[in-house]
Amino acid sequence: MVAVLSGAALTYFFGVDASQYLPTFGYDSAVRHIGQAVQGMVWVFYVFPLAHIVISRMFGWMGKYFEKLLDATYSDSDTKWKSFLCHLVSLGATGTAGYHAFGYAMSFGFGLWLAAPAAAVAVLTAYLVSGALFNRWSNRTVGVITSIVAAYLAFTHCPALPAPFETIGAIAAAVLAAALNALLVFPLVYQVIKAIANPLLASWLSDPLTNLYKTISSEVFSSVEKTYEDKSPYAVLFTHVVNVLVAGAVFLLSNELVGMIHLSGWTAWALPTLLTISSYLFVGRLFVAYKTTLIGALASIGVGAFVGVEVFAHFDHSLWYAVPSFIGAALGFGLAVFPVTYVVTRAGLETIAVSRWATPVVEGVYNFFFGFVQKFWTQFVIVYRRISLSFAPIWANVSKQWDEAWASAKETFDRAFNGKDKK
């Protein structure tokens, strides 16, 4: 089949020259066709078999080496090396995604405070998706993909041939490039990289990279449960840190309020101080009681409100866009962004056991100051109960006199009414 097809192609190709050369000798078209047929038969029955024998004898000894090379590449069972290579490629794809996401976000006019979170989301998404995808690919799949890429590049960059061989030449170049990549280039490059990187890097980096991916993917895919049901010391640390940040925000906003309403004197510093202390002690008490559930709910409402307001202003004050945007942003933040950020941050900080040494500090400071509030409240309740007990006889006497006066007034009213009714 190969001999016939190649013979037909060569006969057709050189037939163009023959059709221009033979008429000078006075031969007609029938002779030219007979010559083309003889040319094809000579190729099929003599030249092609001879070339096949020569090439087989010259390069046949290389077949066993190619067979070993292909088998070592496409049937590689070194799982540790393949895992390392997959995670290395995944990290490359992750870095590329983060770089382009940050660049696109900045080009759209986003500030750093929006571009950085967008890049972080792109990095995390690319890391999880590419890691899961590459770990499921075999070397055969990679070989097929790289061969398709090689064929595409060869087809699009093939030098132009005379008509009518442009398409045929491009297709031939694509097929040749795909075959060379699959049978020679990819296996050789793969084995060279493995020979260098396997003993130097994969031998000690494969397991840490695999464990890192498993930890992050496990945390992310169960992030909602692990965030809103977290009872660990890290949740306590996170709650107190958020409480301090909220108290700081209250202090800054109350200072802005003081400037807006033009307060001066002792009220100018007393109001921010009082509001900040109240926020730290009493809002913090709510945070301590409900932890990540309350924090996530409030943050989701805030993000949803921000997005809804922006959409409301952008789309000519249309509630049809603003309300779904508010709901979508709140749900997206509460069910995806906040949990994922929480568990990823926790996984990173817990590598240095941050909750072990930081939680007692922030919790102790809060309990120290809130202890004064508890003592004050306890004393207030004791005093209130004592006052209530001391006034109990007085209130009982007043209540008795009131009941008697009310009964007397009611009796007088009934008599007057009944007497008027009798008349």
Image (cartoon, rainbow, N blue to C red):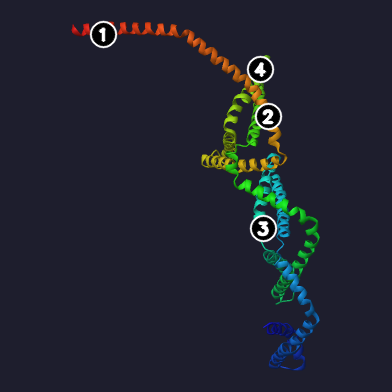
Badge nearest the viewer, 2 or 4? 2
Which residue was labeled with disc 1?
A: 414
Asked whether, in this view, residue 419 is left or right of residue 100, the answer is left
Q: In this rendered view, identify the residue nearer to me: 407 or 313.
A: 407
Which residue was labeled with disc 2?
A: 362
Q: Amino acid at mark 2?
A: Val
Element carrying mark 1: helix
Which residue was labeled with disc 4?
A: 270
- Quadrant occupied by the N terminus: bottom right
On the image, the x and y values in percent for residue 29 come to 69, 91
Q: In this rendered view, identify the residue nearer to me: 247 or 8.
A: 247
Name which of mark 2 and mark 1 comes first in the sequence: 2
Real-space Cα separation, disc 1 to disc 3, in angstroms: 94 Å
Element carrying mark 4: helix
Residue at 72 percent across and 49 percent down: it is: 99
Real-space Cα separation, disc 4 to disc 3, in angstroms: 61 Å
Name which of mark 1 and mark 3 comes first in the sequence: 3
Real-space Cα separation, disc 2 to disc 3, in angstroms: 42 Å
Is 221 drawn above or below residue 286 in the view shown?
below
Which residue was labeled with disc 3?
A: 135
Real-space Cα separation, disc 2 to disc 1, in angstroms: 70 Å
Q: Amino acid at mark 4?
A: Ala
Q: Amino acid at mark 3?
A: Asn
Q: Residues within 10 Å of mark 4 (few under 14, many from 20)?
A: few
Name which of mark 2 and mark 3 comes first in the sequence: 3
Badge nearest the viewer, 4 or 1? 1
The answer, for residue 7, to whether it is visible in the render is: yes
Element carrying mark 3: loop
